[in-house]
Image (tube, rainbow, N blue to C red):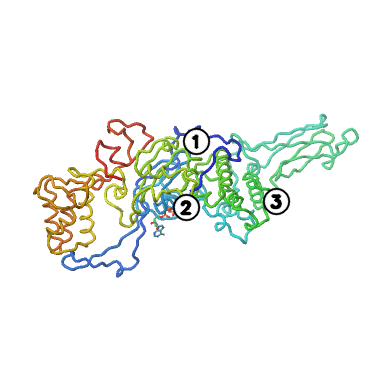
Amino acid sequence: MSTIDRTDDGGPSGTNRTDDRTGGSDREPLLEVTGLQKHFPVNSGLLSSIRFDSDSRPFPFRYDQSSVKAVDGVDFELRPGETLGIVGESGCGKSTLARTILGLEEPTAGDITFDGQPTDEIPEGEFRKRTQMVFQDPQSSLNPRRKVGHIIEDPLEGTDWPRPDPSVRSEAEVRTEDLSEYAVNATVDDNAELVVDPVDGVATVLLTVRPVGDPTETAVETADDVAVELPWGFDAAVTVDDTQRTIDIDVSVSASKADLRRERALELLEQVGLKREYYDRHPHEFSGGQRQRINLARALSINPDLVVADEPVSGLDVSVQAQILNLMDDLQEEYGLTYLLISHDLSVVRYVADRVAVMYLGEFVEMAPTEELFTEQYHPYARALLSAVPNPDPDQPGIESVIQGNVPSASDPPRGCRFHTRCPSFILPDGFSAAGYEAYDELLEAVREKELEGSDPDVVVEAYLGDSDSGDTGDTAADAAGDGGTIPPGARSDARQAVERALAGDWTAARERLEAYESICQSSTPALDPAGSTDGTTAVETERLTACHLELSDQGGTREP
Ligand SMILES: Nc1ncnc2c1ncn2[C@@H]1O[C@H](COP(=O)(O)OP(=O)(O)OP(=O)(O)O)[C@@H](O)[C@H]1O
């Protein structure tokens, strides 16, 4: 995992930018996402969806159209000018979330509101103009056969930019040199805002008017005797009335749509730190960092409000990463952009994000202002994820080795809290010690997998839960767990009955009986709620949200890591 040195950012400030960001917290959200789900069907045909199931009655088959629950109930708001970072292991659903928000994937359920309007009610073209995506691999997202300037102009092709704005007034501001005897009047084309940026609804064109040549020797008698300096893109028609001593100037927009688009691309090249002459070059002539600058210029060409950046700097050298992140920061300020930033690299997110959402198996498990999250994590997954950072040494353990076990399948995620199968802070069911539950859970797993060996229920139970000579109360699982693990009264006889049923072929009944002893982490899905103190009495911070039973209740007990 790469890290970014904040003190050597190669950019204008080099300070910790996250500390002084407000994210416009008092403004209406630009983006609101509620209960968003995106499931991908796994089986394509009817036949491939039919499964053999001996428990199924009257026929031993069931129809199983399973799906990958890539995004499974995500809620958040994004305020104008804010940067929300989304982090999580590979496959947790980050890219799918981004693509679904931008309308590149059809949501399975949930609502997305952009600037106060449901996105499915916003005309597609309108939404596309206000949102842009920057991808990870600038090499593959830039067409190698096209000139860089044309690539930057591409998004404009899908819009009618530049389009005159009837609400903008055009005005001339005239400066004269050595024409004190003349009254100079200038009128400006209504569409001046196509070329100059309006301020407070007025597009002001600056003109400098002077006599051609040496003013002491040249009389101003005809239009040819008058020189007019104009901004790029304008033309002037001059009329001189020598007897009345008046000069009338008619200023019009001379640039064509193609000229205006080209000029915008040239300006954007400069703004992202590249030269105007690169307009005619092709992507292969640039380095990875320069290509990502081109990508940013292209994303900005239509002046979007929201930019979704999916791993924008992965694959780049660390020093180049800092430059691109600083550029994104500068562009955010210049254009008032809102960013949704996806990264598996926590140092990248820490560097630029105002808030961070930690994602696990399609859900947000923690969300907090960046520095608060990096200082203290409430959710055990967030804790494990952040404990793997900073870790520039490839020989040191990464996230996978910090958290035990594999990521469960997104098509069959664990019940309750999805992290409970790997959680070092798992809340034990009542009456179990850690070792006792471990033994019991192994038996449950064997029943779920229909993999019990043996024919005598007592022998099978003993193999999992150890020897017992104390009947139903206070059973020990010393043999199985090795440390005198305890299970609650009644659990042994329930386990025996479950095994009996399993051996008779009724695996469903067996599983249900064993599952009666479950932890809150298995039986109930924790909502993403304000994190409380560990005694469960107070919400510490409304901006700090976590989806963990330990934080949302005063449950005790943990599974040994
Ligand atoms: N078009 C698709 N069809 C089926 N499954 C998909 C599709 N796209 C994504 N998935 C699955 O959805 C889950 C989430 O994938 P996604 O790419 O969103 O995760 P991610 O967090 O962005 O991972 P990475 O960091 O590796 O890109 C994965 O299990 C993935 O295999």
Q: Residues within 10 Å of mark 1 (few under 14, many from 20)?
A: some
Residue under numbered circle 3: 277
Q: In which quarter of the image is the C terminus?
A: top left
Q: In which quarter of the image is residue 172?
A: top right
Q: Mark 3 or 1 closer to N-term? A: 1
Regarding mark 2 in the picture, which secondary structure is present there? helix
Disc 3 packing (10 Å; few <14; some 14–19; many ≥20) = few
Residue found farthest to the left: 471
CA separation, marks 3 and 2?
34 Å
11 vs 63, left or right, is right
Q: Name the residue under label 1.
A: 18
**Ligand 1, image quadrant it occupies:** bottom left
Marks counted in the figure total: 3
The quarter of the picture where residue 531 lies is top left
| Marks 3,2: beta carbons within 8 A | no
Q: What residue type is labelled 3?
A: Glu
Q: Which amino acid does label 2 sit on?
A: Glu
Residue 142 position within the rendered picture, expressed as x and y whole percent measured from the top left: 58, 57
Mark 3 or mark 2: whose residue is earlier in sequence: 2
Element type where label 3 sits in the image: helix
Q: Name the residue rendered at 52%, 35% in the picture.
A: 17
Tell whether circle 1 marks a residue whose Cβ is less than 8 angstroms from ligand 1.
no
Q: What residue type is labelled 1?
A: Thr
Does any atom of ligand 1 lie closer than 8 Å to the CB of label 3? Answer: no
